[in-house]
Structures are given as C-alpha cells and as structure tokens.
Image (tube, coloured by chain):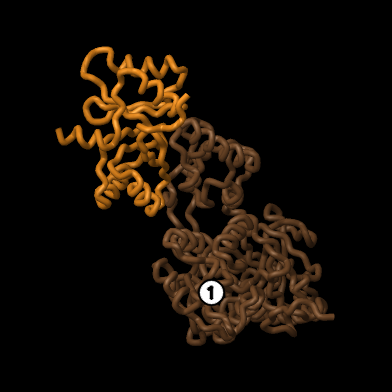
Chain colours: A brown, B orange
C-alpha cells in the first residue's frame, strides 16, 4: 500500500513502535536523573530533602517522585547554578526575554546543540520542508532561541538559509522575490504584517515562490493560521518549545493532524498535571504540560512546569509518526486573565476577531476597575473597507464586534475601534494586555 | 421624479482616532499630493471621529488615503450657496424638510456655502433645484474664491 509520501528527518525514531520509545525514554530518564543529581548541587539537595535518589526511578511513572522545577528555580540559580558541565564545555548561551528583572539563561554543550538541531530538522520535515527549500529567517538572531535554533536545524536538514533577521519588511519582500525563497520563519503577527505590506505594494502572494510558513515565538490561533494561509497562499505550521527546556524543537506540527504537535519523545518526557494540585491527569485530559529533558548535558531540567495548558494523545497519526501529539497550546496558565470572576484568555479574543470580516486579528486589551467593577476594553483595528461615513453604522458595527466577543468570553467588553495599522505589530512576544486594575 | 444627480459633490470621509496628530497626518498627505481643502468638518464620539472633506481633487485624495491604508470612503453631498441674510439657512432646510428627506449632517464651507448630506440625495437635489436656491459645483466654489 502506498500512502501519501511523508517527509521524515529521522524516520527510524520518528516512526518507532511505542514500546521502543518508552524503553529509550526510561533508559534516558534514569541517566538524566543521575546526571543531574551527581552534578548539580541544587538537584542533589532537593532530592535529599524528598528522601529520594536516582535509583528510585525504576519505571517511567516514577518521574512523579521528582521535584518540580519552574522559572523561579532558574532565577534563584541565575546564571549558571543549574549547569551540570564545566563552563568550558558550554558552547552557547541563550536567554528568554525576561519581562521583569533578570532573564532566564541556559547553556548548551556540543551534544545539546546537535540534538537540538535534530529536533528542529524533524519539525521542519513535518511541514514538508526538504533540502531543496530556501528558508528565509525573519526571527532576530539574539539571545532568543528562535533565530539560531531554527537556523541550525533547517541547515542540518540541508536547506539554503537566508539569515535576514527581523524587521525591514520591504527587504524581506525583495528577498522572497529575488532569491525565490520557499519558507518563511517568523512570528504569526509579523507574517500578517508582511502580508499586509505586500498587499499594499501589489505583491502577488499567489504567484510568489513562498510555500511554507514556520511560525513560533508567540501563540498562533487556528483562525489566524487560516487567514495567513488564505492570504499568502502558503501552508503554515506551528511548533512548540521553550528556552528553559530547549527552545524550538520540543514539538512540531505535521500536515496530517493539523493544530497538534508531535513531541520529540526521545528527548523530552511529558506529563499532564492538574495545575492546582500537581497531580497527574489521565491521557487526553487538559492540564498543565510538564517536561523533563532526557538528553540534556548542560542544563538538565527535571519536571519543568511550563504553565502551558494542553492535552496529549498517543493515538496513531496518519503521518506515520508514533510520537505523542499535544494539542495546540490553548493558553498559558499565567496568561489567563480573571475578569469579574470569569477566566479570559487573550488567545480567545484573537481567534474571535480572526472570524469577523471588517477587523484585523490585531488587538489590545486594557483592564481597569476605575468604576469599582472590572472593565475589559478591547481595542480592535478596523479594516479600511469596513469604514462607513455614518456614526450610526460604525456604532452598530462596534456593537456587533462586542456581541461576538461576549458570546464566547461570557463577559461584555467595551470595544474601541482604532485606525487600520493602529495596533502595534509585535516582532517577538506580544505585549497585548495591560492590566491597570488596582489590586485590593 | 428626476433621478440623475447633476450638482452633487463628492465628499471624502476618513476614520480618525481621537489622538493628537491623527488629523494632521491626513492633512499632510493632502498637502504632499497638492490637494486643496475647500471645506471640512470633524466630529467625534469620544473614542473616534469622522473627518469629512470637500476637496478640489477628491479622486486623487482618495487614492492617496487608500495607499496609506486609511479607512476612508467617498460619499455625495449637496453644496448650497447662502445669501448673507436672516432666514436663509431656514429657507434651504425647509425645502428639504418639505420633501420629507432627513438631513444626516450638514456643515458650512468657506463663508456662506454649506454642505448637506441627506438620506436621499437625488430627491433632495431636485427639490432644491426647483426653488430659487443656489446649488454650487466644485468649479463654482473655486471660481468664487478667485472673485
């Protein structure tokens, strides 16, 4: 039987039987735990406090005996407290964009960098990218893991890399036209911006060589993905990763199970827990993703709490890969807003707006309680063709947008219309929420 | 009833946030394109407003605005020259009222020329034309400035 031709980077491990994957995971988990225990005083101390040792890991489920880690641990041990190897053997540092105070810094050994590139090459292959592709990088090449991580992974796959970097949209458009690049790596909101600038300049997206968008750096809702796919005439996939654990490459989206991502299970062990109690949840339930690195030399992370809400399935995938799939991260537990007692996720707002003709998916949320009660204001960007020379009609339009938001969010927001292009486009992590509420 | 509009004038409306500098951006664009503003009105709701312009070259102005990504549109208004005497504005409005047409908004241009946007522009125009009322075209506005 000939199925559709699937593009793999490491077919043997990507399609290995589940029991084989679990065997590799257990071997590597035992090694990783011993490695962390013996080389990182912070881990040793925590293990001793809990009265456990590496020898207690007999089955994969025993991972639950281990202590959790989180961003705070990396802050407390900043910069090199969790490093398990001599700093001479660390080849590179990356840091996550710290919104407050010190950033989170992690290091990589030569083997870490190799494994990282393998994981990225896999996710690129999942999107159908091959060595014949020309990849244009629109991430910045800074301390952020996205730029270098995806660069070296795609290069390992054999692609021609065009390291353009972030910003300068006109130059990006020129490069697509002149170098006939086929893959764009960017944040979804920058891709959207590039799409709009291109459209305004008469750039023919249908005829352009671009065929794939590899997105990251910020959440991409299914609605936004579809809109970019339709307007730029490309296929877009999302991938998942976080600096603390590795950077991009933890999971990637194949072309069969859209909006889900295959976790590189030979390098990362996943758990889904109840964020409130820390208890393990059964497969398929939505909860917080917890990741344990299985092959990290420099910065092993045991049971890292990602604060990302998702669910995971090990059911077989039509693409032939046997690695578990996580649902697109719906929200981060720490992104969740509580407005008048109701949970609101900014990603929901984006998804609703993407479904309304007449507005763009760009938005800002401002929360205040000046009147004594929580008020949520959503700034929404008008599309030029939705404008009418009548206050009555504009107001009806505004109320329609507010109504659509209310139907899903279950609270009534104040909608403010802003000019086309009036919402700042994000080039990295979005800063879309401003909470001005006075805390009691 | 006459249906062809002869005297209606194109008006450019622009969506504006109530923010410092936003109106100026539009005016700078007109200036750069050599477009002359012959009359305007700006009204707002507190959050956003609509700026409306009578321009010597409305088609070009709209192109300039669209190229900048502005939310803008072209609508029709009637421009009427008022004699400088008491009761003149009332006389014009009473013609429109008598025809059962709603005035959506109206503003005054240079000295005694006013722009009127109505629900049904061709009936309003015909009602006004059958009275001793001085409807003016863009050329006449320009000519009047040269007087």
Determine whether the residue tagged by mark 1 lies in a helix, strand or loop.
Answer: loop
Q: Nearer the viewer, residue A76 or A174?
A: A174
Q: Is residue A324 above or below residue A228?
A: below
Q: Is residue A383 above or below residue A371?
A: below
Q: Which residue is tagged 1?
A: A209
- Outermost residue, left side: B147
Apparent side of residue A43 relative to residue B81 in the rendered image (left or right): right
Location of residue B95 in the rendering, given as x and y in whole percent from the top left corner: 38, 16
- Is residue A81 among the parts visible in the rendering? no
Location of residue A113 in the rendering, given as x and y in whole percent from the top left corner: 56, 82
What is the quadrant of the N terminus of chain A in the image?
A: bottom right
Q: Residue at x 40, y 24 (%)?
A: B126
Location of residue A196 in the rendering, given as x and y in whole percent from the top left corner: 47, 59
Location of residue A142 in the rendering, given as x and y in whole percent from the top left corner: 44, 73
Q: Is residue A5 above or below residue A144?
A: below
Q: Residue at x 55, y 74 (%)?
A: A183
Q: Residues within 10 Å of mark 1 (few under 14, many from 20)?
A: some
Apparent side of residue B83 relative to residue A174 in the rendered image (left or right): left
Apparent side of residue A43 relative to residue A171 in the rendered image (left or right): right
- Is residue A177 among the parts visible in the rendering? yes
Q: Nearer the viewer, residue A248 or A108?
A: A248
Q: Nearer the viewer, residue B111 or A247?
A: B111
- Outermost residue, top side: B87
Q: Residue at x 64, y 75 (%)?
A: A123
Q: Which quadrant of the structure image shows residue A332?
A: bottom right
Q: Which quadrant of the structure image shows residue A21?
A: bottom right
**Which chain is disc 1 placed on?**
A
The total of numbered circles placed on residues is 1
């Amino acid at each position: 039987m000939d199925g559709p031709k699937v593009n793999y980077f490491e077919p043997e491990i990507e399609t290995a039987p589940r029991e084989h994957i679990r065997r590799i995971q257990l071997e590597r988990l035992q090694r990783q735990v011993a490695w962390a225990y013996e080389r990182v005083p912070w881990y040793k101390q925590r293990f001793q406090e809990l009265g456990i040792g590496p020898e207690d890991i007999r089955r994969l489920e025993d991972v639950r005996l281990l202590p959790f880690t989180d961003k705070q641990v990396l802050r407390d041990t900043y910069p090199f407290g969790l490093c398990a190897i001599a700093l001479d053997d660390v080849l590179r540092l990356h840091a996550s964009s710290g919104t407050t105070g010190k950033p989170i810094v992690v290091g990589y050994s030569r083997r870490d960098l190799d494994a990282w590139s393998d994981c990225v090459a896999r996710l690129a292959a999942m999107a159908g990218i091959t060595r014949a592709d020309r990849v244009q990088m629109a991430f910045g090449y800074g301390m952020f893991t996205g730029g270098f991580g995806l660069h070296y992974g795609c290069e390992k796959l054999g692609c021609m890399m065009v390291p353009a970097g972030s910003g300068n949209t006109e130059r990006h458009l020129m490069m697509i036209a002149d170098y006939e690049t086929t893959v764009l790596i960017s944040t979804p909101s920058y891709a959207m911006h590039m799409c709009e600038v291109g459209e305004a300049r008469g750039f023919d997206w249908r005829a352009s060589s671009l065929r794939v968008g590899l997105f990251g750096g910020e959440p991409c809702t299914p609605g936004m993905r579809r809109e970019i796919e339709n307007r730029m005439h490309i296929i877009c996939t999302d991938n998942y990763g976080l600096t603390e654990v590795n950077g991009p490459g933890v999971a990637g989206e194949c072309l069969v199970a859209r909006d889900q991502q295959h976790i590189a299970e030979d390098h990362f062990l996943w758990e889904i827990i109840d964020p409130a109690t820390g208890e393990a949840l059964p497969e398929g339930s939505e909860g917080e993703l917890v990741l344990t690195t299985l092959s990290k030399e420099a910065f092993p992370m045991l049971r890292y709490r990602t604060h990302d809400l998702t669910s995971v399935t090990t059911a077989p995938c039509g693409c032939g890969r046997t690695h578990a799939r996580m649902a697109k991260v719906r929200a981060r537990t720490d992104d969740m807003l509580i407005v008048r007692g109701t949970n609101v996720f900014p990603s929901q707002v984006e998804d609703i707006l993407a479904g309304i003709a007449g507005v763009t998916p760009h938005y800002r949320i401002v929360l205040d309680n000046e009147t004594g009660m929580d008020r949520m204001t959503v700034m929404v960007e008008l599309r030029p063709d939705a404008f009418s020379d009548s206050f009555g009609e504009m107001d009806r339009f505004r109320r329609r947008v507010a109504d659509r938001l209310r139907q899903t969010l279950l609270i009534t927001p104040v909608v403010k219309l802003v000019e086309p292009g009036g919402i700042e486009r994000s080039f990295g992590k979005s800063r879309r929420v401003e909470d001005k509420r006075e805390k009691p | 009833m006459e249906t062809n509009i002869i005297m209606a004038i194109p008006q450019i409306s622009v969506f504006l946030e109530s923010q410092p500098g936003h109106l100026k951006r539009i005016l700078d664009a007109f200036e750069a394109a050599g477009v002359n503003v012959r009359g305007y009105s700006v009204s707002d709701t507190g959050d956003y407003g609509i700026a409306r312009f009578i321009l010597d070259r409305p088609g070009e102005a709209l192109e300039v605005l669209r190229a900048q990504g502005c939310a803008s549109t072209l609508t029709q208004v009637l421009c009427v020259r008022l004699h400088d005497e008491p009761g003149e504005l009332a006389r014009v409005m009473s013609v429109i009222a008598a025809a059962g047409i709603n005035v959506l908004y109206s503003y005054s241009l240079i000295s005694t020329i006013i722009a009127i946007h109505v629900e049904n522009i061709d009936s309003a125009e015909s009602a006004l034309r059958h009275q001793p009322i001085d409807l003016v075209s863009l050329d006449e506005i320009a000519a009047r400035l040269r007087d």
